[in-house]
Amino acid sequence: MEACFEEYMKRSTQIRRLSMPPEGAGGDPGRFYRAFNENFNKIKVLLQENRGILDRKVYQPLKHLETMTLETAEELITFSDELANTRTLEMVDVRLAWLIADKLELFYEKRYKEEITEETKNRYIHCLFRKQVLSYNVGQGYDRGRATDVLTDRYKDCILECAEKAEPFWKNLDYFAHASEATQNELMTMALFRATGYERAYYDEKLVRRQIECYEDYLSWMEELKLQRSCPKIDWEFEVFSGYSYLSAVQEFLYWESVPEDILKKLKLAVERAEAYVKAHPDNFRTDLETMETAHCAIDYYLGKTDFSRMVRIYERWEETADPTGYDRESVNANLLSVIFVLWMCKKHPEQIEAHRAFLLKAQKLTFTYIRNARDRGTYDLMQRYTGYIMDDYIELSEGISFRSYYENILITTQPTLYVHCSMVARIASAILDEALCLDPELLLYANGYETVEEILAHEEELRTFLYECCFFHDAGKLFFLDTINLYSRQLFSEEFDLIRLHPLMGWELLNKRESTRRYADAALYHHLWYDEKGGYPMNLTYQGNENAFLYQIITCADCIDAATDSVGRAYSRGKNFKEMMDDLRSNSGRMFQPEIVDLFESSKRLQKRVEYLITAEREKLYKQAFSYEHV
């Protein structure tokens, strides 16, 4: 790999390391924050250097494919491979890797068509293979159900398109038989992975049937005797097992819905054949009997041949045998997937919750601790995806851990800068509310249904608590998205911004799912809507008729104040000082911000002084608490 790309990877590692708490900063919050701020100043420099490399060595060459040399293309595809290397999950940038493979496909396809040789075929196939695998990875990272279909469908379709383009090569027996082992493996993987283009994070019978059809086509190909005889070095028995194993895993996309019997019978046959292979080859490290037995039991559950309690006992066994100190992919699966599957089951069968209360309570405590100890253990991507699933269907139980506490634990572990931001917004909003209560309580008329000033003043504490919790949950939708700003050494792509713009709606959906947080849901939905309703997002909202409009406008203002003045949590920009922030409030009054909130700042030196303290000394303390793991 070209030296500049190696330097890019090294700097990316440095960026990740510098985003962690500084060592030797002692117990003084000010010293800690200054050291941390110094780290983020270094990150800015590293980001600028890496973005320069991307502009010169990636983006510019990809704009001129017609003059690109093979040497440059090979350097780029090698760089793409390295970007997607999962040995360090925090380092993975599959979207950039996908962009490179997507653009280079045209280059390699053109070379192949102009000069049909084994070399041009192999390079073209490798590019298709890389693009297909990356399409799966990007789509999986974006997929949060129907709300994100508009983003993920592009990558699901790409999986299918890559398979379609590669199919003539794997169907050409003479070519396949004489291809290199690496090319054969890439073609078999593309044929097997075609079905993943129909996977979704929700049940859709038509798509499930398409998955099954793809795996059946793959198995039909794998079981051709002529193919097997022409390639005697391939372990065909294992490849057939892989096909049946993947086919049986389609049960994971049924989400405990009512499923037609013909689908279940096909899955039943697949799991029986896969299980038979595993039992016949107990020493094959590439197989897992427990996984096959669990899939078998799940399919039997759909068929009515086993009951809910037996399924829970199987998942309980997963949990009991999991290593609570392990954070490799297998350990994370064992510690968290069992709980996720039971939550999904309980979602469809809430009448079973009470009968399995003991398991759920134990699982809450175990996973809470496991997540708490996950910081900097190299599982950032996987951990955040799984914790999002847990939060989506979290079940609150008396004597258990509240949704708020579990949410806070996840936030401080997986996105500590977001934890600081939410805490800061809550404090700044509280300061604005206190000033409104003191100087002009009529601004708060109808908030929370209070129709008179007397009612408002009689319920000051309830208003403060309500607003604080609204702020703490306002960015709940970001729980589902990686903190890519500080992890990627580049500007975000437009669709990544589109994904981020979905977070108000996704936060609203999450908070609406349970009684304890439902009253805070609108705060998540409204906090990016401008005062004049001509900007921000989502754009289909209005403050008209919303009794809490003024409170949500306080949150919008507090959100912008913290974002604009924080240099650490937003390493891609310099934090503004208090005077610059005040200038922003004035220039955007009546547009982004409620004019009467801006007037409170203009007329109250007390509010100015309090907020200036919050964005300096208070922020320093919060960063130290969050990154030193001192629970607030």
Image (cartoon, rainbow, N blue to C red):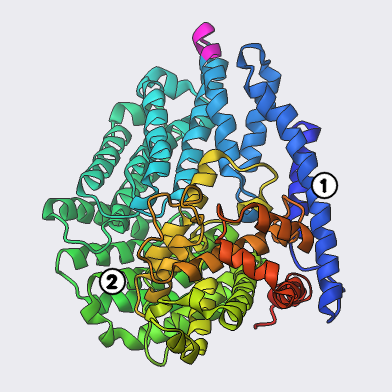
Residue most extreme to the left? 261
Residue most extreme to the top? 114
Please name the amino acid that badge 1 sits on: Val
Please determine whether, in this image, residue 579 is positioned above or below residue 394.
above
Front-most of 54 and 132?
Answer: 54
For mark 1, give the secondary structure.
helix
Residue 357 picture location, percent across and down = 33, 87
| Span colored in magenta | 110-116
| Sequence order check, earlier mark of 1 and 2 | 1
According to the picture, the residue beneath numbered tag 2 turns out to be: 347
Q: Is residue 112 magenta?
A: yes
For mark 2, give the secondary structure.
helix
Front-most of 174 and 128?
Answer: 128
Front-most of 528 and 53?
Answer: 528
Residue 388 picture location, percent across and down = 46, 64
Residue at the image point whose x is 43% and y is 76% from the top: 447
Q: Residues within 10 Å of mark 2 (few under 14, many from 20)?
A: some
According to the picture, the residue beneath numbered tag 1 turns out to be: 45
Quadrant of image for the C terminus: bottom right
Residue 582 picture location, percent across and down = 72, 60
**Residue 22 relative to residue 137: left or right:** right
Residue at the image point whose x is 84% and y is 70% from the top: 23
Q: Nearer the viewer, mark 1 or mark 2?
A: 1
Please name the amino acid that badge 2 sits on: Lys
